[in-house]
């Protein structure tokens, strides 16, 4: 009997070790794939242009995983060393707080959640296991903790002044990268407007209204009802405008996009998306939506994964960028990688020069490439971050 109990205890301990020590890393490695690891030497002409760029990306989900953002890894897409190698000036780090089981681009209810199990496996604090708001706050704590021990290699940007200081510092020393906090879905509010201030105080400066399901703010493009702004949602938009928090319409339903653009007094961003003009997906923006976002002064981050542009090939990313630029103007086109978002991509942050090369091949001018690769995002933030 004692031997059986001892064996059972050993098996339980082994199971706990696997769950808390390895399970999340296994899932991470399986979900965040780099399709091509060796891109060869960067051509001289590409290197010359790439080194002159101020590169910025609107969306990466690194904080969701069991990683140290300061450590270069052989899996996944983003960490500080690889961002520096890729000459990235500013990376938006997004807090993912809830995803439904069997999520898809067509229809999801919000009554299940994958992130609870992942939070446990990642050894996140117990407070995050039952609170969506606490999950967001903890991911902010992770990035701020990394900044404190980074020896200046990571600088979190919260204000226009912070951005100006980052740009000035990188003009002298490129061995650093800026990080800006975003959130993917205001189900993080847990239905309470006062939690918006808590998220702002934690450093979040870009906030997506929805993710893969409808919430108390409004409808998702993949939700059940796919409605517009709720009464709470209208209060949220007014408060975000007051705080100079950028509204992110990625994953928003058509009704929600229309309602927000009618109400907001500030430009919006669609952080990571594709366009129906090159890949007709429920997730992607129509021509009319693109025109409305441009009229608002907003910008659109084109994604790097197959669900956004049809495949992860750089040529398909460039094709979507060309279509968008031709339709609404080059000033509205940005990068929206969705790195580490459970995506399979052709290149990681260290090898983003591959996209620079593809844009050159596709006939974009150097000035247009400068705008797409980060110039547009930086100009947007210069005007729309809090002072």
Image (spheres, rainbow, N blue to C red):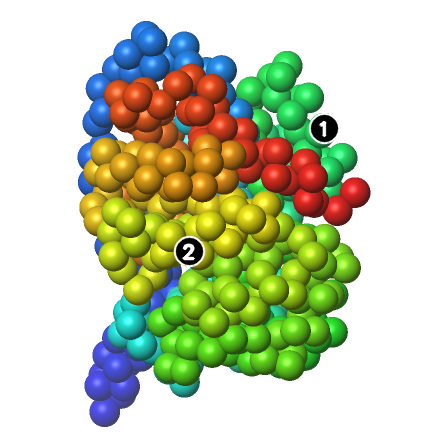
Q: Say which residue label 2 marks.
A: 288
User: Depth-wise, is mark 1 or mark 2 nearer the camera?
Assistant: 2
Element under label 2?
Answer: helix
Q: Residue at x 26, y 21 (%)?
A: 361
Percent from the top left, x then y, of residue 355? 32, 29
The numbered mark at residue 165 is 1
Camera-nearest residue between 297 and 222:
297
Where residue 201 appears, x then y in whole percent?
A: 74, 58
Rendering coords of residue 295 (x, y %) = 56, 48
Q: Can residue 67 be seen in this snapshot?
A: no
Q: Give the number of the disc on residue 336.
A: none
Q: Name the quarter where the N terminus is drawn.
A: bottom left
Q: Secondary structure at mark 1?
A: helix
Q: Earlier in the sequence, mark 1 or mark 2?
A: 1
* Residue situated furthest bottom in the rendering: 1
Circle 1 Cα neighbour tier, 10 Å, few/some/many (<14 / 14–19 / ≥20): some
- Residue drawn at (22%, 19%), measured in percent from left and top? 40
């Amino acid at each position: 009997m004692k031997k059986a109990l001892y064996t059972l205890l050993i098996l339980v301990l082994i199971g706990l070790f696997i769950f808390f020590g390895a399970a999340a890393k296994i899932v991470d490695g399986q979900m965040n794939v780099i399709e091509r690891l060796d891109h060869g030497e960067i051509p001289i002409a590409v290197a010359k242009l790439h080194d002159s760029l101020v590169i910025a990306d609107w969306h990466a989900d690194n904080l969701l995983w069991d990683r140290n953002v300061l450590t270069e890894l052989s899996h996944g897409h983003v960490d500080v060393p690889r961002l520096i190698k890729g000459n990235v000036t500013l990376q938006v780090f997004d807090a993912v707080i809830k995803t439904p089981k069997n999520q898809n681009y067509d229809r999801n209810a919000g009554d299940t959640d994958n992130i609870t199990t992942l939070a446990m496996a990642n050894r996140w604090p117990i407070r995050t296991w039952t609170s969506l708001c606490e999950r967001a706050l903890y991911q902010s704590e992770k990035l701020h903790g990394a900044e404190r021990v980074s020896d200046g290699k990571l600088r979190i940007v919260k204000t226009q002044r912070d951005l100006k200081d980052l740009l000035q510092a990188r003009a002298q020393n490129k061995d650093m990268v800026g990080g800006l906090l975003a959130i993917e879905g205001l189900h993080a509010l847990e239905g309470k407007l006062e939690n918006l201030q808590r998220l702002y105080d934690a450093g979040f400066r870009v906030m997506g209204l929805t993710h893969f399901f409808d919430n108390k703010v409004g409808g998702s493009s993949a939700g059940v009802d796919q409605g517009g702004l709720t009464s709470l949602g209208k209060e949220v938009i007014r408060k975000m405008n007051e705080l100079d928090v950028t509204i992110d319409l990625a994953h928003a339903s058509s009704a929600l996009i229309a309602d927000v653009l009618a109400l907001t007094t500030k430009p919006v961003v669609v952080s990571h998306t594709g366009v129906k003009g090159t890949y007709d997906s429920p997730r992607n923006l129509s021509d009319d939506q693109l025109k409305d976002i441009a009229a608002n002064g907003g910008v659109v981050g084109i994604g790097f994964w197959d669900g956004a542009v049809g495949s992860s090939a750089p040529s398909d990313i460039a094709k979507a960028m060309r279509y968008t630029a031709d339709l609404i103007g080059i000033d509205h086109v940005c990068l929206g990688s969705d790195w580490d978002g459970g995506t399979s991509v052709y290149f990681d942050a260290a090898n983003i020069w591959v996209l620079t090369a593809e844009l050159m091949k596709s006939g974009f001018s150097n000035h247009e490439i400068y705008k797409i690769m980060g110039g547009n995002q930086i100009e947007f933030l210069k005007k729309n971050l809090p002072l």
